Each structure stands twice: as structure tokens, then as C-alpha cells.
Image (cartoon, grey):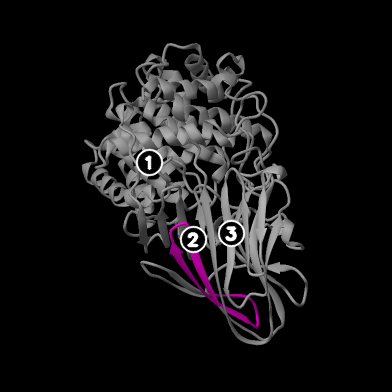
Amino acid sequence: MKKEKFLHNYNILISPFTTSGDLTTGRINVTGEVAHFGEEIAKIEGFLRLLWAEAFNIDGREKEYFKNLCQGILNGTDKNSKHFWGDIPDYGQLFVEMVALSVFLIESKTYFWDKLTNAEQIQIASYMNQITDANITLNNWQFFKVMVQVAFYKLGVSFFTKEGLDNSIAIVNSYYLDEGFYTDGNTTSKDYYISWAFHYYGLLYDRYMSEFDPETSAIFIERAQLYLSAYLAHFDSDGIAVAYGRSLAYRFAQGALLSMVALTGKIDVDFNLLGSLLLGHISYWMNQEITKPDGSLAVGYAYPNVIMAENYNSAGSAYWAFKYFALLGCDKDHPVFDATPTSLPLGRKAFKTGNFIAETTADQTFFYPINNTATTDGYKDKYNKFVYSTKFAFSVSKGILHLDEGAFDNTLAIKDPDTGLFLTKLTEENFEIFEDQLVFTWSPKQGICIKSTIIPKGNEHQRIHEITTDKQMEIFDMGFANDALKAEETLVTKTEKSATITTPYGVIGSKSIKGYDEALVVNTTPSTHLLFKKAALTGLKATVFPGNHRFESSHNASYRKED
């Protein structure tokens, strides 16, 4: 594995912009998906997110693409230019992008910043300084204030204040829990995206500030080291990360912390494993349908798909994925580029602070979360399934009228006897995490109480649902989804109490152990699954009468790894 492989992938992804003079406007010419902040901001957002990768591309400083980006920054921050980005209101989206600009200016200092006039430096710094006294969201955005202050310090800008830096760091520290986990502000949300994002910035802080602020730098390094095992538990040995939680449209940003660990060199890690995961991760994504016809990144996951997106995903948002390319800042003889293929250890581990159990098998990693959510579009699908998998991902509901549009993989769907609509778990009333199982209670509506036990067993898991209800109702205990795009290659095997779907991609199945009336197969509405444009899932059905009942089932998924 050579550095050139990663540069090759990067060059493919930036090819829509390398010959474009549009970059000098401080925007990228993308259209399509519109976020809540509108199309104009989306173009600026996309431009600034390109900086994440080019900041570290030490081999690209003399190229025209780099120079166009630099000119775009000058034009975008110039109040007298027709390309001015505009003043940023409180809570404005462009505050998010100030961290990419900060990192770019630091990393390319001798090639760009140092060649500017004093007036041009003040112009750029003044634009960034809007964040200092602005009201911004009390969550991971607070780290953006930290990184802007870091940029001011490293660039010798007079706007730097130790008080401002310390105040922002204090807020960030207030979100820290234990074992390397952060919450996203004063919430219970401590999902995958949040934790790796905090540590990415923490490692950057150490990279830039270890001499000025060794104490804080050491704290961030210690926390990242603590989080490493939990972070690696989100991957399988092919380098594929589990699809779980919000911001999945950023795709290979999932591997960004791997790159930052390689770049900073402060975390104790097996570089053979790190290099294997880094290569596997980007190779996987480059083989998916992630671009539009013009070569720009599309909103979606394994294919363009706005059903799974959040309201903050615009046509330029996906370039947050470029944080992955921090490893371009590594010298070509870095050991990560000479890695011997290495697999993750097999087995199961519970992360009680992170509220999940992870189990890595020979072909994938299964992720069993509990008591974690975010107030984002589709949160019930992105956080509240019984299990997620690196190879089988999950579906997002398009409606709750029918099983096919609900696409209720790995959930217990209850047909509301009063409305006919389907109900699923939204939150837990209480929960326990053991080394070998999750136990939690939840109530889909008044009069129905469910105690669920989820027991991981390799490529299979067992579920026990103890249901107390004062209503007669139908329940559907649904398993994994499989690729059903090619009907001629899909084999369905069904008995009264079990169902299996076999395809060239893999095998999934559901089996009744106790209580269910019949097995079923559901062909879900197209584009509801993150990986499969058309999917089918297995499940079990029962009619439940008023009283106390116990249902037991097993569900499995195995991936057919290509030779």
C-alpha cells in the first residue's frame, strides 16, 4: 500500500473542481439537495469543506487547484467583492465551516498565509472572528470556537485571547463523560459521530498547541486513547464502519479519526491494523455509487438517497467526508502506508458509557445500542433499532401505514389497534447493559408495556419480548434486510415458523422460538435501505390478546465475502 493510492482516490473526488474557475468565487457549483439554510450557503459550505483535505495535501501546494482555493478564500472574505460570503448571523451554518478554514490556514501557512499582505490577513481573520462573540449551538459547535482561537494563535493574529480559548475549552470539557465518550451538549446524545468528531479536534489541538497548552493537550490525547477501542469496535476487518446514527451522508468521514490518529502519531495503536482499516474503508466507499453524473458527491449513503438525509444535508454537505484525507499530511514513508493486512480481533465487548455492545465476527461487526438518540430526521431508525451491522446497515421508514413502506428491519413493529398505524420503539423507560445482553423496557402507547432482552450470538442474536397489554393487537418482529434488486438471484425459503432470504450478497433469516404464529417476508419500498435500492426482510408475526405474553425469536445475517 502506497500513499499514491490515497492520493489517486482524492484526485478522483476533487476532479469536478480542479479545472473549474468557479473556485475563485469561494463557492462550488453544486445544485440539487437543499438544506434548511438554502442553496447559496450550500455552495459556500461545499467550497469550505474542500479545505479539509487540501489542508493536509502536502503534495498539492503548487497546483492550480490549491491556488484557486486560496483566491476563493480571499474573495469570499472581502466585503468589497461581489463574491463576499456575507455576514454570519447567530447560529449561522458558516460558523461550522470556520474550523475547516482554520485548519487550512494553519497547515498551509507558508504557502498562503505568509504570502498575504497585512490587510489581506486582517480581512480573513476578521471574517473568522465573527464566531468569537456570536451565539452558536451549545453542542459540538463549541469546538469550532476553540479551533478558530487556535488558528489566531498559530497565525499570530491579534484577535487571539487566552480567556476566549479557555472559556470555549471549558464548555467542551463539560460535555465529556468517561471512557473517551462525549455527549453532544447537555443531552444524552453520545453517538458515534459525536465522539469521533470531538477526538478529531482534540488531536488537532494537541498538534497545534502542545507547547502553549501542554496540560489540555495531554487531556485530549488521554481521552482519545481511551476512546480508541470503542471507535475500532464500529468497524469490521474490511474497514467498513457500521451505519448508525446521524450524519451518515458524510460517508467516509466515518474513518476520519483513523487518519488523524495516523497523522498525529500520539495514540498507541497497531499501524498494520490502522493502515488496513484506512485502505479498506476508502476502497469500500470508492466502489459505491456515491457521486452524481458530474462527479460531485451526492447526498445519500451507498447510492444517492435523500430519504435518509437530515435537514442540514445540502448538495455541498457531503464534503465533510474530506476530513478522512488528513492522512495526506503523513510523509510517504509513514508506517501506515506500509501496513501488513491485519484483522480486528473477533469477539464481543460491552461499552457501558457508550451504551452499546459490539460483536465482531469473521465477516462483519454487529452493533447493539441502547438509550441513545438525537433530535434529527429519522432518529427512530438511525438510533433505535435492536441491532445494526457493517454489512447489512438498516432501513429508514417512508411511512407507517404499511409494512413495506415502514421497512421495519430489526424492530418490533406494533399495529396500533386504535389507528391501524405502526408503532416502534422511540425511547426506553429503563435499561441495563450486561457483557452478553441488553435488557430494557419501553411503551409504544398507553396500555402496552414491553420488556425486551437482546442477546448477541455471533452472526445471530436472540430476542425475548415480554409483553403486557390491555389491547388486542398484531406484532411484527422483523429481522435483517437483504439485497433484492435482482429477483432472479433471490431465493426465499419459508416454513410456518421461519423465513430465510439467500442472495449473492448474503443470507438472512428469522425463526420463532416461542409464541409467534407465522413467519413472513416483506419486500420494502424502494430506496428505504441505505445499501440496497430494493430490499427484502424476514420477520415473524403474532396476534396478541390482553394479558401477559412472552415471545422468543432468533435473527441472523451472514455476508458472502467476495473472493
Give the residue pinned by disc 1: 201
Q: Looking at the image, which residue is at 53% across and 39% down?
A: 251
* Quadrant in the picture for the N terminus: top left
Q: Give the range drawn in magenta.
A: 442-465
Left or right of 32 on screen, residue 143:
left
**Nearest to viewer (mark 1 / mark 2):** 2
Left or right of 353 on screen, residue 417:
right
Q: Nearer the viewer, residue 448 or 455?
A: 455
**Nearest to viewer (mark 1 / mark 3):** 3
Going from N to C along the chain, the mark reached first, 3 or 2, is 2
Give the residue pinned by disc 3: 509
Please, what is the dominant secondary structure of the magenta stretch? strand
Give the residue pinned by disc 2: 460
- Say whether marks 1 and 3 touch (CB < 8 Å): no
Going from N to C along the chain, the mark reached first, 1 or 2, is 1
Q: Quadrant of residue 514?
A: bottom right
Q: In terms of secondary structure, where does tag 1 sit?
A: helix
Q: Looking at the image, which residue is at 52% across and 17% down?
A: 71
- Say whether marks 1 and 2 touch (CB < 8 Å): no
